């Protein structure tokens, strides 16, 4: 499974390729799916380009995207979109149109109650486990761990030379306590090394303008679709290499 992450917390300053309106997100989603993406992660935005959990904005975004694609569509619940845990829960309980899944960052305050609320609403939970946080320890001890849709293993190390080792350390910290599929991805300088590692290990991954603005050769990406096409090529190349000579897990 290759998920496309259409925009993330990026805004207009990150370039015209980043989709900010529901219509632009829908266009980008359709192009990315045509390029091979099988799942979508999107951050609904206010008119001024800020991430939001607003029921009205989320409904408009989901309707626009679903009018163009038939693959699952997920959204963020990141604390930066609504820092107060109680208000965040209130917003989510007010959603009138539900996403197929939503990411919950396990190191953030209120994560367990938020995940339980989403599961109760019938929304799949992507357990966001960030490297460099206590998210892995908290998740592996959580009674909700077997109930999530998948683990979103997020490598926050943006240094290309070390991101792969950081990814291995994160996977090791997750261990065998989880029983759910793992989606492994990196960001910025670590995006491509971690995607290739996901290919070698046979894990799901994601790519898109949230994770990187650059193609593997360092050129600026013109669109999410271009990143997806490049990501699939890199993934398949790494998968073949891994099949021929499996790397030893550390």
Image (cartoon, grey):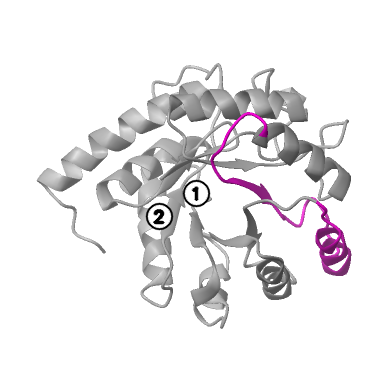
Q: Secondary structure at mark 1?
A: loop
At a point 45% along the width and 25% down the height, the residue shown is 35
Q: Magenta span covers which residues?
A: 67-96
Neighbor class of circle 2 (other Cα within 10 Å; few <14, some 14-19, many 20+) is many
Q: Which badge, 1 or 2, comes first in the chain's sequence? A: 1
Is residue 193 inside the magenta stretch? no
Left or right, 122 with respect to 49, comes to left
Work out whether 63 lies above or below 173: above
Residue 177 place in picture, x, y as percent: 41, 78
Residue 85 showing in the rendered view: yes
What numbered label is drawn on residue 157? Answer: 1
Location of the N terminus by quadrant is: top left
Q: Nearer the viewer, residue 205 or 159?
A: 205
Q: Which mark is residue 167?
A: 2
Q: Is residue 18 at all visible to an observer of this figure?
A: no
Q: Given contact means CB atoms under 8 Å apart, are the residues at marks 1 and 2 in contact?
A: yes
Residue 51, position as x, y percentages in the image = 78, 42
Q: Locate residue 189 relative to residue 231 in the image: left or right.
A: right
Q: Nearer the viewer, residue 210 or 35?
A: 35
Asked if 172 appears above or below 154 in the picture, the reply is: below
């Amino acid at each position: 499974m290759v998920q496309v992450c259409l925009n993330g917390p990026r805004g207009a300053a990150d370039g015209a390729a980043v989709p900010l309106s529901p219509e632009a997100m829908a266009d980008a989603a359709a192009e990315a799916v045509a390029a091979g993406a099988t799942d979508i992660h999107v951050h609904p935005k206010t008119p001024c380009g800020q991430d939001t959990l607003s029921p009205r904005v989320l409904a408009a975004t989901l309707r626009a995207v679903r009018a163009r694609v038939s693959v699952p569509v997920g959204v963020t619940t990141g604390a930066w979109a609504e820092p107060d845990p109680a208000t965040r829960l209130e917003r989510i309980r007010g959603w009138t149109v539900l996403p197929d899944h939503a990411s919950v960052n396990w190191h953030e305050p209120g994560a367990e109650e938020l995940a339980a609320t989403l599961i109760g609403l019938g929304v799949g939970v992507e357990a966001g486990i960030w490297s460099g946080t206590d998210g892995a320890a908290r998740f592996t001890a959580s009674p909700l761990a077997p109930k999530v849709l998948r683990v979103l293993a997020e490598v926050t190390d943006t240094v290309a030379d070390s991101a792969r080792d950081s990814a291995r350390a994160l996977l090791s910290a997750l261990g065998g306590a989880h029983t759910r599929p793992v989606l492994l991805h990196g960001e910025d300088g670590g995006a491509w090394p971690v995607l290739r590692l996901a290919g070698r290990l046979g894990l799901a991954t994601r790519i898109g303008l949230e994770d990187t603005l650059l193609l593997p050769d360092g050129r600026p990406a013109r669109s999410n679709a271009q990143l997806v096409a490049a990501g699939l090529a890199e993934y398949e190349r790494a998968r073949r290499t891994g099949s021929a000579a499996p790397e030893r897990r550390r």
